[in-house]
Amino acid sequence: MQRFFRFALLVLLTAGLAWPPGAAASGEDSPSPRLDVYRYRMKGKVRLLFFWVGKDDVGGGHIAVGREPEPAGGWTEQIEVLFGSNPERVPGGINRWGYGTETGQWRKRTGSPAPALARSVFEGFLKHSKEESLDEVQANEAARQDDVFWYDGIRSIVEQSGAVSEIRTFAAAGDFDFRNASPVHCSYQERLRQGAKPDKFKRLDNAKDYQSPFGFLTGVRYLIGRVLERHGGEGNFRRFRPWVPYVYNANLYRLRVKDVDLEKSFDLPLADGSSQTYRNVARIRMVIRKEATGEDHEFVLWVPTEGRYEGVPIRIVDKPRWWLRVELNLEPEAEVGRSTLAAVQCE
């Protein structure tokens, strides 16, 4: 399951960084309602024998981050991500995509001016895919003959006492991609409304393994906040290795900063062939470790430390499969609308 949702985690990473991470640390009691939307372009590379072959603009998606204040103080944040390949741009018509939202509930705590994370909930689904190689992906695409396509959905709830995970498989009548995801979203909601038991269920009791109920996104946001705070303070990243435990799919993980390099100038390529220059960009390498197995997974992201896009990832690079390298680049000023998939009204 960890391998299956690895690409989804990459996508969620993008969302986790898209929200300026200083809100929780600032002691702000009840921030104003807010919705930020970002759009990304995807570049993919596949490994052929001893070299990589790549193509730009093979997919993309968006991030929507909303925040609502709570009457009793604190706030609720919801991060929506929707990313995937564009089958019209990928050789062989490969169509792989995923959707997810994570909600973090921040509540006031006794003796502290700053609200604390009380609960995190992640819900999402991913087009069913267990291929281990590019050949398997292409063969499965070519072999499809029916109009029923399968997806795997997950609900991962993390609380102070422990965490639970529910996996549900569901079908959608049609081969939809990330650009027309509403019918699949409604199929998932219908699966939930049926009230049937999940296909898989897991529970993790918190035996003092973590102090705060971080999910993946909230944990990433916390570490990005630490990086920005360090840059604004002493600015020295030597021996700077912050980490945080988090829970996903009822499994305990450790997320840590491996190293940080500060680039005074960074040119981000744009879709039209030009580039946009950002100043003082932190290049951050992070590592996810699954505590039960010791398995590590590394990714790299570039985050401006100042300006309009402070705290927003402008580039993310990861290898979700050994033969696949994915690069997500921000498209500045791009508008994708103010609506979110979570707001779609299903019949």
Image (cartoon, helix red, strand yellow):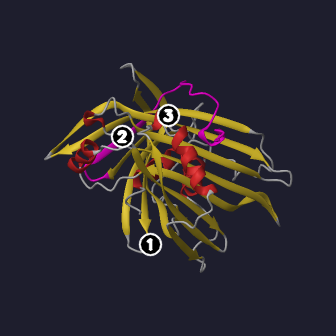
Looking at marks 3 and 2 on the same chain, the residue that comes earlier in the sequence is marked by: 2
Q: Residue at x 23, y 50 (%)?
A: 136
The residue labelled by disc 3 is: 180
* Residue 143 in the image: above or below residue 118: above
Q: Nearer the viewer, mark 3 or mark 1?
A: 3
SS for dot 1: loop
Magenta stretch: give its range: 321-347
Q: Residue at x 59, y 39 (%)?
A: 341
Q: Nearer the viewer, mark 1 or mark 2?
A: 2
SS for dot 3: helix
Q: Is residue 340 left or right of residue 110?
A: left
Tell me the quarter of the picture where residue 212 sits.
Answer: bottom right
Real-space CA distance between mark 3 and mark 2, rounded to the nearest whole angstrom: 12 Å
- Quarter holding the C terminus is top right
Looking at marks 3 and 1 on the same chain, the residue that comes earlier in the sequence is marked by: 3
The disc labelled 3 sits on which kind of residue? Asn
35 inside magenta stretch? no
Tell me the quarter of the picture where residue 307 sits.
Answer: top right
Real-space CA distance between mark 1 and mark 2, rounded to the nearest whole angstrom: 32 Å
The disc labelled 2 sits on which kind of residue? Asn
The disc labelled 1 sits on which kind of residue? Glu
Pinpoint residue 195: horizontal percent, then vertical percent: 63, 62
Mark 1, residues whose alpha carbon is within 10 Å: few (<14), some, or many (≥20)?
few
Q: Is residue 151 left or right of residue 119?
A: left
The residue labelled by disc 2 is: 95
Real-space CA distance between mark 3 and mark 1, rounded to the nearest whole angstrom: 37 Å
Checking the image for residue 291, the label placed there is 1
- Quarter holding the N terminus is bottom left
